[in-house]
Image (tube, rainbow, N blue to C red):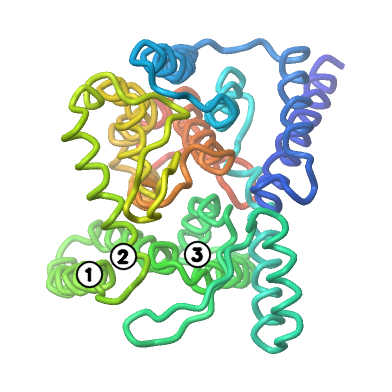
Amino acid sequence: MRKAKGNLIQLGGNTLFFLLILVIMLDPTNSVLHLKNVVFILLVGYNIVFFRPDFTYLPHILLIFGTLFLGYVLAEMQMNAVDMEVFGGVVKGFSPLLLLLWIKHYNVLRLSFVPVLVACLLVDVLFILATTNDAIQLALYTFVWAHDDMIMMSSRTILGFNIFGMYYKSMLCATFVLLCLYQRILQDSKRKLLYIIAAVIVTFAFLISGTRSPMLLPFALFGAIAFLKINTLRKSKYLYYPIIVLGILLFIGFVLLLATEKGEVSNQIKTAHLRSYMELFETHPLYLLLGQGPGTAFYSEGFHSMTYTTEWTYMELLRNYGIFSLLIFAVMVYPLTQLYKLRHDRRVAAMMFAYIFYLLIAGTNPLLISSTGMLVLLTIYSYTQRITTTGLLPVSTGLSPVKTRSNPVLTK
């Protein structure tokens, strides 16, 4: 009886967490459904009532919010103008991390599978409709423009090719799900066809984004999985190493070619932003130590105006919090230290590479300090929590977790 009651309570929590992920995936800007705050509050309240909090990650939460408010105090001490609405938005952006107190009760990766597929399928269908009918494209553009550009539609030239892109702002939350789908395809599985169809849906959503980093991410993920697979071979792996090295060099060269493409507006804006950061730090070297403060603005040549934020996420953290930004970085990097300890398991190593790829992309896109960025952090913390404390490898494809037999480290 008690077990049945516990299962029912867990089902209620899973349902609310599932709804939160679904809302974040479908409405990352909270400008259409307006349900993100409601579902988040319901989930937190449900956890408070039915689950005992685990204070393992309480220091991580305190580091984040302590840094935010310390940055605000230091900004006031330096008499820097702080926009309280912007500062409140930053605090709100980090607020999903409160769920770390109950993260041990949830397999976030598994709960993300269906929401990711729904969001990717939606953007795939919309892309096909928009590219086949100009009237639909105009109507869709008008809709997303009126709803805080929840889907960023663009026509741009990349390496001489004209590309129409539709980038869903929650797209990078699909990174870990896509990784697990690729892993399932490479394994012997009775549901391989189902996984292939799901992988095609998600991969296509990345490829049509029109944004360089997300477009390259599927190739990076598949390459990492292939490398880890080949690395387990005894003799034949040395035959593949030259091909791997050549592939890595070609991939790096392609990335550098994209990053240095002349005439690319995005590259010019990002370069101008960097110059503005350098000028700001030269003029106010104290900002490198204490920060300018969250909610403060600076002049950027990229926008030719005052701005509160740019695409250089890590530079923004340094500008706002100075040396104390290292505390925020530490919370982001912590899961990597745990994954690295268990890197001998291919699935864990692949997850580590996927998270590294995400952090690299997030550093050049305004993605991290938001509900989507926090969902990624909750997912990786949930994953590391389960493999380090229970010896279970979460399966993100809706199947039950399985005991790891191939790696005794995970079962200790």
Residue drawn at (34%, 48%) of the image: 300
Q: Which of 371 and 19 is in front in this view?
A: 371
Q: Quadrant of the C terminus?
A: top left
- Image location (x, y in percent) of residue 372: 56, 43
State whether residue 115 appears in this view.
yes
In the visual, does 305 lie left or right of 35?
left
Mark seen at residue 260: 1
Disc 1: CA contacts within 10 A as few (<14), some (14-19) or many (>=20): few
Label 1–label 3 contact, CB within 8 A: no
Q: Residue at x 22, y 69 (%)?
A: 260
Residue at disc 1, secondary structure: loop
Q: Which amino acid does label 2 sit on?
A: Asn
- Of circles 2 and 3, the one toward us is 2
Looking at numbered disc 1 in the image, what kind of residue is underneath it?
Answer: Thr
Residue that badge 3 annotates: 188
Task: Say which residue label 2 marks.
Answer: 267
Report the Cα–Cα distance between label 2 and label 3.
43 Å
Q: Earlier in the sequence, mark 2 or mark 1?
A: 1
Q: Which of 147 and 404 is in front in this view?
A: 147
* Place of residue 44 in the rendered image (x, y in percent of width and height, measured from the top left): 71, 21
The answer to whether the residues at label 2 and label 3 have Cβ atoms under 8 Å apart is no
Residue at left offset 70%, top offset 74%: 126
